[in-house]
Amino acid sequence: MSQPDVIVRPLAARDEDEWRVLWKGYLTFYKSSVPDEVYATTFARLLGDDAQDFRALVAEVDGRLVGLVHFLFHRHCWRVENVCYLQDLFASPEVRGLGIGRALIEAVYAAADAEGAPNVYWLTQSSNHSARQLYDRIGTLTEFIKYQRP
């Protein structure tokens, strides 16, 4: 497949069905799932106007959604400016390796620049080797290890 013409744009209300398919694919990749209520609530929040809520961008090829990214700006105790947390990134399996993930991350970088947020960070599983090939090219691996409440 040749390099597609990718349009990265904000999520819109008309995208809900395709967004659900993509987010379900993302959750399935991580061997997870959420109840329908979480899909509905998350989608509504992504379209909301609360500056503290997550934002979403989608990648579109030939009028079809093929990728998504969810991200959030938040305060940081070590900086005056907000920082940006990129929580979810997903490209449909049939378009992987065609620059969709990179386009979405670069769009988040641009959003962070526009908001004056000097830092964008994200997490991934250590076994997510294909994604890490991209991340190693466009990000810096840190030494931090994640812990969470059981």
Image (tube, rainbow, N blue to C red):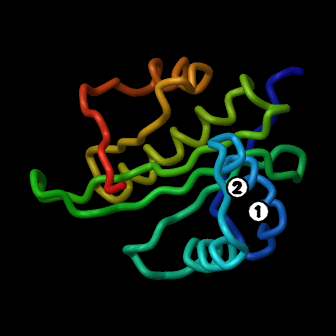
- Residue name at image x 42 percent, y 39 percent: 123
Q: Is residue 39 above or below residue 131?
A: below
- Residue name at image x 25 percent, y 33 percent: 144
Q: Are marks 1 and 2 in contact (CB under 8 Å)?
A: yes
Instruction: Where is residue 112? Give x, y as percent.
Output: 38, 51
The C terminus sits in image quarter: bottom left
Instruction: Where is residue 6? Give x, y as percent.
Output: 75, 40
In the image, 130 versus 33, the foreground residue is 33
> Mark 2 sits on what residue?
23
Name the amino acid, label 2. Answer: Trp
Q: Quadrant of residue 97?
A: top right
Q: Quadrant of residue 115?
A: bottom left
Element class at badge 2: helix
- Residue name at image x 60 percent, y 72 percent: 42
- Residue name at image x 89 percent, y 46 percent: 62
Name the amino acid, label 1. Answer: Arg
In the image, 62 versus 96, the foreground residue is 96
Element class at badge 1: helix
Instruction: Where is residue 12? Give x, y as percent.
Output: 71, 70
As drawn, the label of residue 83 is none
- Local packing at callout 2 (Cα closer than 10 Å; few below 14, some 14-19, many 20+) is many
